[in-house]
Amino acid sequence: MGKFTKLTALVLGSTALTLVTAASASAGGTAAGTNVQNTFTLDYQVGGAVQPTIDTGPGGLDTPTEFTVDRLINLTVASDGDTTVAPGSTDQELVFSLQNTGNDTQGYTFALINEAGDEFDASGLDITYYFDDGTAGFGPGDLAGTAYTYTPGSGDLSESVGPDTLVWVVVSGDIAAAQTDGDTSAISLVADTAEAGTAGTPATLVTADAGGNTLTGAAENVLADDTGTASAGDADNDGAHSATGTYIVASADLVAAKTVTIFSQDGTGCATIPGTPAAGDQYAVPGACVEYVISATNNGTTAAANATDIDLTDILPDDLEFIAAVRSPEFTGGSFSAPATNTDCASGACTVSLTNASLAFGETGTVTIRALVK
């Protein structure tokens, strides 16, 4: 074996390799700005004589191979679900989550978009945000510390958000009283990545590095976000992400009617409701028992559209004598009142009323009244 061949074999057989990093990994990877050094030592002999060690490690005379971890700009905005609202309600909440899935601490700006194609735009939109307490759930007791307020679209900076940190963003808005059952208002929250700084100060949005990769020194920006759902201002790799939540109006749609029949021509069974009406043709002669039935049906299209605070009043004509009245169990809550049996209805003395009752979605409630023709 020649000297050159023997030296090469000795060198290759003596190589050791070590990787050194300065920070732990997160969901976004190794922290931006980390200096990663690849070091090794190499020992060899020539003609049996030990030669000086080639050492690129700590204390060594040779330069290590190194690079600086660049800054991955990534984030995820998601809706926590749509919200059912009533016409005329205020401070109704849509909840979104924001997570920094990059590898550096960032600030964010927030903007709201009233999406097209729905029936109305919620008004008075405000933003409040909270840091998650580690439970990764939104609700009472699941929020950590301060509630931060933010002016939508202000261009001001949020609180600093570290890698992996989860933030809950609450959008509150008002619903016009004129909205009807099934109307929707779609709201998109757009979060844009900015340089970290003091909350409330003007934000400096991040931009992608355009000067080519420099291996060492400063961490360069690499934008890696996906397209969200907003109709404008959110594309792949632009430092922004968005999600859409929807207000869905749930309003009761009541249809009411009143009918009258002759229960019995001679007044038999008038006080027993429901009882059995007399057979055959019955006529409204003096002494006959007449039956009024007031019915109300909740025809809302949304299961949450319950009708509440129902007030129903019926004043019987002077030509009658009140006998009995009942409400059906579909009318819940509130109170029901009627005159005493055999009350003369002259001068409006006979008032039957249902107050502050409720009627669930899809239900039909009735009030049945019996009276004698004077």
Image (cartoon, rainbow, N blue to C red):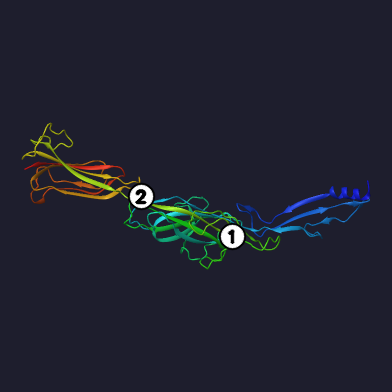
The residue that appears at 76% across and 52% down in the rendered structure is 18
Name the amino acid type tagged 2.
Answer: Gly
Q: Position of residue 235 (x, y in %)?
A: 54, 56
Q: Secondary structure at mark 2?
A: loop
Going by the image, does 143 lie left or right of 68? left
- The answer to whether 286 is drawn above or below residue 4 in the figure is above
- Residue tagged 2: 182
Q: Nearer the viewer, mark 2 or mark 1?
A: 2
**Classed neighbour count for the residue bearing mark 1: other residues with Cα under 10 Å, few (<14), some (14–19), many (≥20):** many
From the viewer's perspective, is residue 29 above or below residue 371?
below
Snapshot quadrant of residue 35: bottom right
Q: Residue at x 80, y 50 (%)?
A: 16
Question: What kind of element bears circle 1?
Answer: loop
Residue 301, x across and y down, in percent: 34, 46
Residue tagged 1: 105
Asked if residue 270 shows in the view, the reply is no
In this rendering, does residue 41 appear at all? yes
Q: Residue at x 89, y 55 (%)?
A: 51
Image x and y of residue 117, in percent: 41, 54
Q: Nearer the viewer, residue 363 or 47?
A: 363
Tell me, yes or no, whether the two marked residues, 2 and 1, touch with CB atoms within 8 Å.
Answer: no
In the rendered structure, find residue 115 and report the number of the disc placed on it: none
Query: Upstream in the sequence, badge 2 or badge 1?
Result: 1
Q: CA distance from mark 2 to mark 1?
A: 42 Å
- In the current view of this chain or complex, which residue is farthest to the top? 279
Q: Amino acid at mark 1?
A: Thr
Q: State left or right for residue 368 relative to residue 42.
A: left
Front residue of 142 and 309? 309
Q: Is residue 43 left or right of residue 120?
A: right
